[in-house]
Image (cartoon, rainbow, N blue to C red):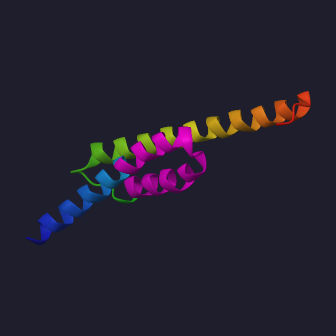
Amino acid sequence: MAKKKVKSSRDVLSITSIIMGVVSIIFAFFIPYLVGITGILGAVFAYVKKGKNSKKLNLWGFVLNMIGLFLAIIMLTISLLAVMMQNLSGIVT
């Protein structure tokens, strides 16, 4: 019985990592500041619980979280460039 609980806890952290990865990808377009929290936590969950049974789940969780972090960096860069271009052109809203 104890083995099943340990096995399922690994799967729970792997699935949590995948869910946080999907959430971080969605948040990257709307609230990129929150991706720092969800993306890093999800990547840590995927990295901490490395196991033979949930190796693919951990990999998916890690990759999804890294994609979310990458998209958030791109969106923050684009928004920073837009603000800089607006200030340079002298347009005030």
Quarter of the image with the N terminus is bottom left
Say if 79 sits above or below 16 in the image.
above
In x, y percent, where is residue 62? 41, 46
* Side (left or right) of 60 relative to 70: left
Say if 62 sits above or below 85 in the image.
below
Magenta region includes residue 22: yes
Of residue 44 and residue 83, the one placed in the foreground of this image is 83
Of residue 20 and residue 43, the one placed in the foreground of this image is 20
> Which residue is most to the left?
1
* Side (left or right) of 46 relative to 71: left
Residue at 31% x, 58% y: name it. 13
The stretch in magenta equals 19-47
Magenta region includes residue 39: yes
> Which residue is most to the bottom?
2
> Which residue is most to the top?
89
Say if 85 sits above or below 31 in the image.
above
Residue at 39% x, 57% y: name it. 45
In x, y percent, where is residue 90? 92, 31
Residue at 24% x, 55% y: name it. 11
Residue at 12% x, 64% y: name it. 4
Of residue 27 and residue 3, the one placed in the foreground of this image is 27
Quarter of the image with the C terminus is top right
* Side (left or right) of 33 relative to 46: right
* Side (left or right) of 77 relative to 29: right
**Magenta stretch prevailing secondary structure:** helix
Q: Quadrant of residue 64?
A: top left
In x, y percent, where is residue 47? 41, 54
Viewer can see residue 66: no
